[in-house]
Image (cartoon, rainbow, N blue to C red):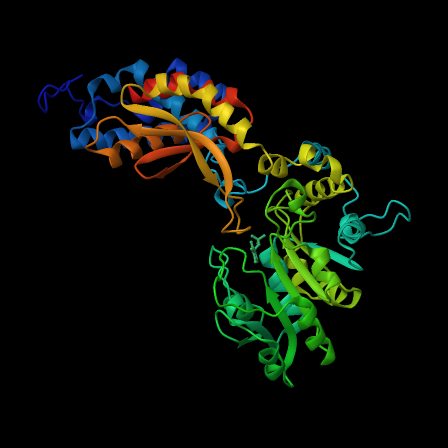
Amino acid sequence: MTATPTDAGRGPKASAKDLPSVDRLLRAPAAAALRAGHGHTLVAGEARALLESMRTQAVAGTLDSARVAPDALDAALAQRVEARLAPRMRRVLNLTGTVIHTNLGRALLADSALQHLLAMIAGPNNLEYDLASGGRGDRDGLVEELLCTLTGAPAATVVNNNAAAVLLTIAALARGREVIVSRGELVEIGGAFRMPDVMAAAGATLVEVGTTNRTHPGDYERAIGERTALVMKVHTSNYAVQGFTAAVDEATLAGIAHARGLPLASDLGSGSLVDLAAWGLPREPLPQEKLASGCDVVTFSGDKLLGGPQAGLIVGSREAVERIRRFPLKRALRVSKLPLAALEATLRLYLRPERLAQDLPTLRLLVRPEAQIRALAQQLAPALAAAVAPRFAVEVVALQGQIGSGSLPVERLPSAGLALAPVAKPGTGRALDELAAALRALPLPVIGRIADDRLLLDLRCLEDAASFVDQLPRLREVLA
Ligand SMILES: *Cc1c(COP(=O)(O)O)cnc(C)c1O
């Protein structure tokens, strides 16, 4: 091995000539054992990639000669193979303070939903098979009756997500014609889901009425014409217009639409099947209320406040739901057996509303008492302080969390947590970024938020304290 002395004080560097060939690396006993376990294809591919990247570093003069020692090469190869097999989708600890966090997978499934999901995918099931007649069944049929019971709707159907539900509703009821929406409701939901674009994608023409802050019944009445096919309300879930405002409620709008023979659709976004005020939470509109007000179709998400899997729920009149179900796009947007199994089990929990705050994790987290969260923060503070000392100081703080996923954007959930602040003032921003990165690099990544020169960990969603505490020795090592 030739070692070229390089930059000041660092160890000797290897040259490309010091690297073995792919074949030689693969013939080593350690690599042979890897091949016996994982097969030749994966191990050979990783050996090639490893040597290639080391060759690049050697040419650049940055490859330490210690890394080309046979043992080090074997270890590096084993590590690459392991990393390649590790899933990219990982569990994380959501300490952001946002309970239904879209980037972190939204609602957590209830135990019964997880169990039912696992049981249903473990083998064949009656997804589209009628066990009574032995004939073909309908996947919607598995949850339609439940959805009707829970919302009072005469009919219901399910698609892949609520964006799909809105797209399909507009396409089925208004393709090639006009849809009337208030200017105050032309929202962007995030991820490029903008009402005007959805309208265009569905092949309908958007007719905007009113102004950003005020829309009146007369605005809708004047806009209805020959080409109108649908009147639509969109719940402005992720922002609030405050001050001098006016909007037309569903009951009034239903009167206007029905007098002209037109259906009224309402996109609720989150939509909760139970009145959250019963648990002291801010109120979110319920699909059952919108239907009772005269809406012909109501759409909402499965994985927001409902607390289930990703799905788009469509409830409404028999006629409107039948048109939606028969529209060809429905087939492209249909829900698969995995979410459908989880959805059915989640909906069944709503048959026992008194138990919901225990059974449904999303609701359980939303109603978690502030005092309990604060007590947990106090309990964890000393161990966290020891792990991040002496670079960071830890303090128990009151925090304001939120429901998330566009629900009740201006309402805050009083919460508590831990604030970590760099002890040395200069370089605060960099120190916080480094700390956040160290937390994300833990085996169970911890996701907090940075605000006001501190890293905040809101503990509302930390139910299993051990999952956090067990990682503190590792955090201490990384920060040392
Ligand atoms: C979240 C939301 C949607 C999109 O629902 P997904 O289930 O995310 O597809 C549509 N409309 C409104 C008002 C929303 O809040």
> Does residue 393 lie above or below 87 as drawn?
above
Q: Looking at the picture, how far across and down is residue 276, in whole percent?
A: 65, 45
Residue in the foreground of this view, choosing between 86 and 119: 119
Q: Is residue 468 left or right of residue 428?
A: right
Q: Residue at x 58, y 33 (%)?
A: 368
Point out the residue furthest to the right here.
Answer: 133
Quarter of the figure with the C terminus: top left
Q: Residue at x 73, y 76 (%)?
A: 258
Note whether residue 347 is visible.
Answer: yes
Q: Looking at the picture, how far across and down is residue 404, in whole percent?
A: 52, 46
Dividing the picture into quadrants, the one containing residue 289 is bottom right
Residue in the foreground of this view, choosing between 168 and 94: 94
Point out the residue furthest to the bottom here.
Answer: 226
> Does residue 313 lie above or below 391 as drawn?
below
Quarter of the figure with the N terminus: top left
Q: Looking at the picture, how far across and down is residue 465, in whole percent?
A: 52, 22
Note whether residue 176 is visible.
Answer: no
Residue in the foreground of this view, choosing between 84 and 440: 440
Dividing the picture into quadrants, the one containing residue 337 is top right
Dividing the picture into quadrants, the one containing residue 428 is top left
Ligand 1 in which quarter: bottom right
Q: Is residue 475 left or right of residue 261?
A: left
Q: Looking at the picture, how far across and down is residue 274, in whole percent?
A: 70, 47
Q: Is residue 156 left or right of residue 38?
A: right
Residue in the foreground of this view, choosing between 248 and 138: 248
Total numbered labels:
0
